[in-house]
Every structure is written in C-alpha cells, then in structure tokens.
Amino acid sequence: MRKETQKEMAAKAAALYVRDGMTLGLGTGSTAYYFIREAGAMAAKGFRFRAVVTSKKSRELALAFHIPVISPEETEFIDLAIDGVDEIDKDFCAVKGGGGALLREKIVASKAHEVIWIMDESKLVDRLGAFPLPVEVLPFGSRWTADAAKRLGGDVRLRCVEGRPYRTDNGNAILDMTFPQRTDYRTADRELRRIPGVLETGFFDAICSRIIVGGRDGVREILNPERVCMTAMDESF
Ligand code: 5RP
C-alpha cells in the first residue's frame, strides 16, 4: 500500500476525535494536509470548530477548506492538536521539523489538552537517528551557533533551499543535525538549548497522548500510557 494512502488513513482515523466546538491545533506537512482536508470536509457538513495553525502553508490550506483560523492570542488553550512526525520511537519520543515548522508546532502542542500524531508506518523506528534533528536558530550568528552545536558531537548542516539558507515562517534558520549512534536525545536536546542562538529543537519528548499509524494491515492506534488524555478517558467510562 502506498505511503500516501497510509497517511490518509491515519488522518481519517484522527478526524474521529474531533468534536463540535473544539479549538484545534493544525500541524504542518503532507500527513497534516490529509487531516486538514478531512477537517474541511467535516466543516462543510456543519461541524463547528476553529483552528490555530502551525505554518503559513497550513493556514492557506485551512482557509481553502473553509476552516476558521484564529491566532494563539484568541484562545487560552487548544483542545486537540493533530500533527505528523518525521520519526518516533517506542517511548513516543519524536523528531519533527522536516517541514521547518517545529517551533510553532511545539508551542501549539504544549498548549493542547491532547496531542495526536498521525503517520505512515515508516515513521516508527527502534531508535531515533536516521532523520536529522532540525534545530531552529536565529540567523544572527548562526555560524557560531552551528560551531557550538558541532562541539556536542555530530554533523551539523545549515538547511539550504536552492543554494540559499532556508528561512522558517519565523524568519529563522534551521540546522539539521545528525548524531552518532546511541546518542541520548534528551541530553542532546538539553545541551542544544543552552547554546545562545538556539530557539527550539525538533525533539518532542513524548508529548503526544496517542499515535495513529496507517500501515499495510490497516490503522493502528497506540496510546501513550504516560499522558492522561480526554479521549482515553472517554473510552474507559
Ligand atoms: C513539519 C513537521 C512534519 O510533521 C513532519 O516533517 C512530517 O511531515 P510529513 O507528514 O510530510 O512526512 O514536523 O515541521
């Protein structure tokens, strides 16, 4: 089964957790696209919800699907954030930011009562590391920031597009970092945050309450037992 079909299946399953009146957090990327499209179809059927978006691209998509978009200033919290991942291990630790939206994605996830990550099965890994860890840094002094990051051990590349430094929606640069095998991501994340100029890393420390994986055998949902979540409670009562 094609990866795109797997993503679409996961997105459709996630849409079952959307309730009327919710404030949603909309992620970024190709898997998030399928969810936004699904949410748009629900809005067309009369579901009322609104959304905080994590990127300009997702804002465009949400508006194209007639989903009301609000700014973070207009809400105290988010009921449900839905997003994709680049890779995730069995402890629900994930690397995100392949699409460059990691900073806004982390802000939105941190204000969400529930976070669901949707994905095709290729995103499940035994150990993080195959996908480089994106780190959002201030353009000012970014070479010094990269040098400091390099001293933590590992390879650091400034993300470029068509030969020019990539810029996030926040106007910042991204360093893509590859670590030696068996690197402890929690430690690396902590060390990176101590470097002046580092604004956020794409390491998401088990922040989700549920993952939904589209695969060759259908859709699998896996609950994170460490995170209390509304939908899990719904199911047990
Ligand atoms: C964007 C992200 C995406 O969620 C991540 O890159 C996965 O993207 P895709 O669904 O296209 O594989 O973190 O910043």
Image (tube, grey):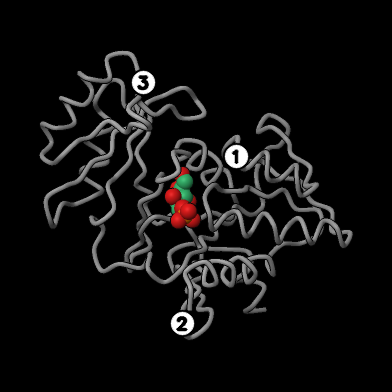
Q: Pinpoint residue 173: horizontal percent, then vertical percent.
A: 37, 26
Q: Which residue is mark 1?
A: 57
Q: Which residue is mark 3?
A: 138
What SS does tag 2 mark? loop
Tell which tag, 2 or 3, sits nearer the viewer: 2
Q: 181 above or below 190?
A: below
Q: How many marks?
A: 3
Give the residue type that dot 1 points to.
Lys
Q: Pinpoint residue 196: horizontal percent, then vertical percent.
A: 27, 20
Side (left or right) of 9 relative to 222:
right
Residue at 35% from the left image edge and 18% from the top image edge: 139
Rendered image quadrant of residue 74: top right
Indicate which disc, 3 or 1, sits on the residue closer to the N terminus: 1
**Residues at marks 2 and 3, CA–CA distance in whole angstroms:** 41 Å
Q: 167 above or below 217?
A: above
Q: Pinpoint residue 186: horizontal percent, then vertical percent.
A: 25, 48
What SS does tag 1 mark? helix
Q: Pinpoint residue 219: horizontal percent, then vertical percent.
A: 53, 79
Local crowd at mark 2 within 10 Å, few (<14), some, or many (≥20)? few
Side (left or right) of 80 relative to 148:
right
Side (left or right) of 172 relative to 74:
left
Side (left or right) of 152 relative to 176:
left
Residue at 16% from the left image edge and 26% from the top image edge: 148
Rendered image quadrant of residue 207: bottom left
What SS does tag 3 mark? loop
Indicate which disc, 1 or 2, sits on the residue closer to the N terminus: 1
Residue at 33% from the left image edge and 69% from the top image edge: 90
Local crowd at mark 1 within 10 Å, few (<14), some, or many (≥20)? some
Residue at the limit of the structure toward the bottom, as seen here: 217
Q: Decide if ligand 1 comes within 8 Å of the CB at mark 2.
A: no
Q: Which mark is residue 216?
A: 2
Residue at 64% from the left image edge and 77% from the top image edge: 235
